[in-house]
Amino acid sequence: MMKKLVFICLLFLRLTGFSQADSVPYSREYEFKEGIFLNVEQFRRNDPIPKSAIISAYPKTQVDFMKQVTGERYITYKAADGSEQKVETLSLWGYCQNRSLFINFNDELNRVNQIGTLCHFTSIVTMPVSYQDPMNTYGISTSDEMRQFIFDTQTNKVFDFNVKNMELLLKNDPALYTEFMKLKKRKKADAIFVFLRRYNENHPLYLPAK
């Protein structure tokens, strides 16, 4: 029994050590591979369907090749086994182009402005707007609004980037949470970017080493 426990412990340490040695905390120098991420796991492994495997009439030498390809309804690519696969663009998790990361949200592929355990991005959201015309008739119209969001890489959830949600997310860091909660309401709104950056520094996003 004791030998079995020792073996399990050694195996655990070996696997843990391998994982740490094989990963690095994200920094601006980190390079994501160009291609499409079918799901969040491919993003975490930095293992997209590479640009070289994508079948398209667009020249791959063009700087905005990935943007052009993801502008189509479907993307065709050659899988590892040599077969051709077709995927709907709006089913992608995202893609990488020229070291920039894009995430699929609200049926749009939006550039991630800040990458970390908590990723920040903006997206256009269509909002309902009530109106009253000169004939005193009431109705509902729509208006496009640019809004800010946070993608939590630990839970795969997207949150509106606001004070209420930052209070929720910061609970994972008691010291930062306590400091944030001591601020007055207006100062909280002004400080959410600062606390987002500090949270990511305290809790780095680990990605595969190059």
Image (cartoon, rainbow, N blue to C red):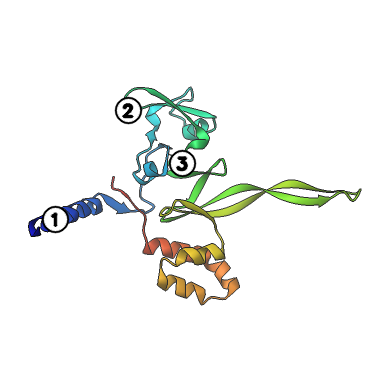
Residue at 54 percent of width and 29 percent of height: 73
Question: Where does the N terminus fall, quadrant-wise?
Answer: bottom left
The residue carrying mark 3 is 93
Judge from the rendering whether residue 101 lies leftward or rightward of residue 145; answer left or right: left
> Mark 2 packing: few (<14 Cα in 10 Å), some, or many (20+)?
few
Marks 2 and 1 sit apart, C-alpha to C-alpha, by 35 Å
The residue carrying mark 2 is 80
Is disc 2 in contact with disc 3, using a CB cutoff of under 8 Å? no
Q: Earlier in the sequence, mark 2 or mark 1?
A: 1
Residue at 48 percent of width and 22 percent of height: 57
The quadrant in which residue 202 appears is: bottom left
Is disc 1 in contact with disc 3, using a CB cutoff of under 8 Å? no
- Tell which of 68 and 43 is nearer to you: 43
Residue 17, compared with residue 96, is above or below; it is below
Q: Is residue 63 visible?
A: no
Question: Where does the C terminus fall, quadrant-wise?
Answer: top left
